[in-house]
Image: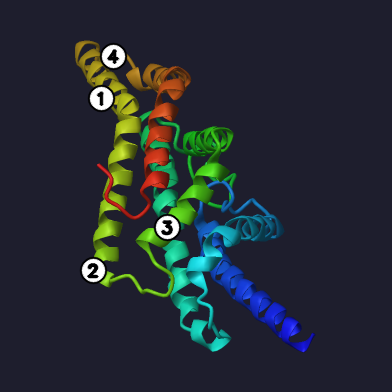
Amino acid sequence: MTEMLAQILGIAQAWLLAGGLVFLRVGAAFLVLPAIGEHYIPMRIRLGAALAMTVLLTPALARDLVPANAQSADYAGYIMTETLAGLLIGLSVRFIAMALQIAGSMAAQATSLSQIAGGATPEPQPAIAGFLLLAGLTLAVMSGLHEMVARMLMESYDILPAGRMPLARDVGAWGVNRVGHAFALAFSLAAPFLIASVLYNLALGVINKAMPQLMVAFVGAPAITLGGLVLLLLTTPFLLPVWMRAMQAALANPMGPLP
């Protein structure tokens, strides 16, 4: 009876150690992941989601994470490595979400809409940026974001093994690639607004040169504002699928370079 209890205690200890390691990576990732990691999501919901994801992933990962002779002291050094791995994985997807915010800010600046409801959120941003981000996150959640995140976290152990600290050189190169990709994606999404703004200002300059007595500013300001809103209405159904493909690519390859 005593031997059986000792075996049960050893198995339970191994499972708890495995669950703790998985929770370190999942919890750190959930702090910065889009949708579940937003500031307006209560911390209790984030914690519950992280625990649920841990319970889901631990049975599939426990055998590889915990050796048969595992001891609690052997995993003290895993706290930093697993937390860092989770943050890197979460940031790889957060950069794609930030591309929508950058694109919205660029579009708002180009269409004179940057000050509308700019301070209505805890993080001041133009209304177009907030609208695009919310629409993109809604599309991602409806497309099965939780399933893609679970697959990404499970496959991340092949790229970032438990207990192994990633090299600073590799993390730096990865970060530069992801930041550059986020700005390139943002510029591509905001391109219709930037092109329309350039054409509008050129036309306004020609009109002002031909008719100096006409106060083109009073006519042009409402026109560019209305044009920006109409352009947002027309282009959003085409911009969000492009962004969603970039999100799926980041979830499928969180630590690799993106084109």
> What residue is drawn where x is 46% and y is 77%?
80
Tell me the mark number nearer the camera, choosing from 1 and 2.
2
- Mark 4: few/some/many CA within 10 Å (<14, 14-19, 20+): few
Q: SS for tag 4? A: loop
Residue on which disc 1 sits: 198
- Whether residue 83 sits left or right of residue 19 in the image: it is left
> What residue is drawn where x is 51% and y is 65%?
25
- Mark 2: few/some/many CA within 10 Å (<14, 14-19, 20+): few
| Observer-nearest of 102 and 2 | 2
| Observer-nearest of 35 and 54 | 54
- Mark 3: few/some/many CA within 10 Å (<14, 14-19, 20+): many
Q: SS for tag 2? A: helix
Disc 2 to disc 3, C-alpha distance: 19 Å
Sequence-wise, the earlier of marks 1 and 2 is: 2
Sequence-wise, the earlier of marks 4 and 1 is: 1
Residue on which disc 3 sits: 156
Disc 4 to disc 2, C-alpha distance: 61 Å
Tell me the mark number nearer the camera, choosing from 4 and 1.
1
